[in-house]
Image: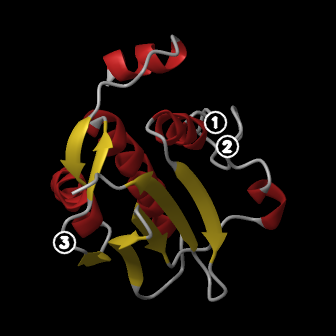
Amino acid sequence: IIQSLRSIFNDENPNTSPIDLGDIVQSVLQITTPEISRRNINIKLTLASKTVVLANAPEIQQVMLNLLNNAIQALSSSEQASKEITVETSCHAGKVELAITDNGPGIPKEKQAKLFELTSSGKRSGMGLGLWLCKQIVMRNRGTITHQSINTGGTRFVIKLPGEPA
């Protein structure tokens, strides 16, 4: 992780290899499951098969870990009776998508425009690096990351990466 951070700030190209996003999801869930269980959050997985991308595995793991931790924190402060995080992978038109959705309170409209900017944090203890860093990592792996507000409450982040040719 430290080497990845250094390379991001030095504008080095990421050390990429073919990785399956389903494997990344499973590895990150192994790390986060104790906290998810402790906070009584349900995880809903929908993983497509063959979601192979050419990317830097530790960097993509770091992005997913940050997004999952954000969802856990959002749900921890939520009054929602049934707390849920949905993690999905899918393939569309040569792109592989990873989506993380929570049914928490959502992100206030006034903060959404600057969500991916450096030092933009909606948390009291946050430094404002998390989502900015996620965007930098995804972009250097030739992808995009977007945010969507859910009408019924909650937040959805979608990462799109180029699929690995068969």
Could you tell me which secondary element the residue under label 1 belongs to?
loop
Task: Answer few, some or many: residues within 10 Å of disc 3's Cα (few below 14, many 20 plus, some between 14 and 19).
Answer: few
**Residue picked out by circle 2:** 121
Instruction: Name the quadrant of the C terminus.
Output: bottom left
Q: Which residue is mark 1?
A: 128
Describe the element under mark 3 as helix, strand or loop. loop
Residue, far front: 166
**Number of residue marks:** 3
- Residues 113 and 51: in front is 51
Check disc 2 and report its element: helix, strand or loop: loop
Q: Amino acid at mark 2?
A: Ser
Position of 17 with respect to 125 (left or right) is left
Disc 3 and disc 1: Cα gap in Å?
34 Å
**Residue 117 location, quadrant:** top right
Looking at the image, is 82 positioned above or below residue 73? Answer: below
Check disc 3 and report the residue beneath it. Answer: 49
Q: Residue at x 35, y 72 (%)?
A: 90
Disc nearer the start of the sequence (1/2): 2
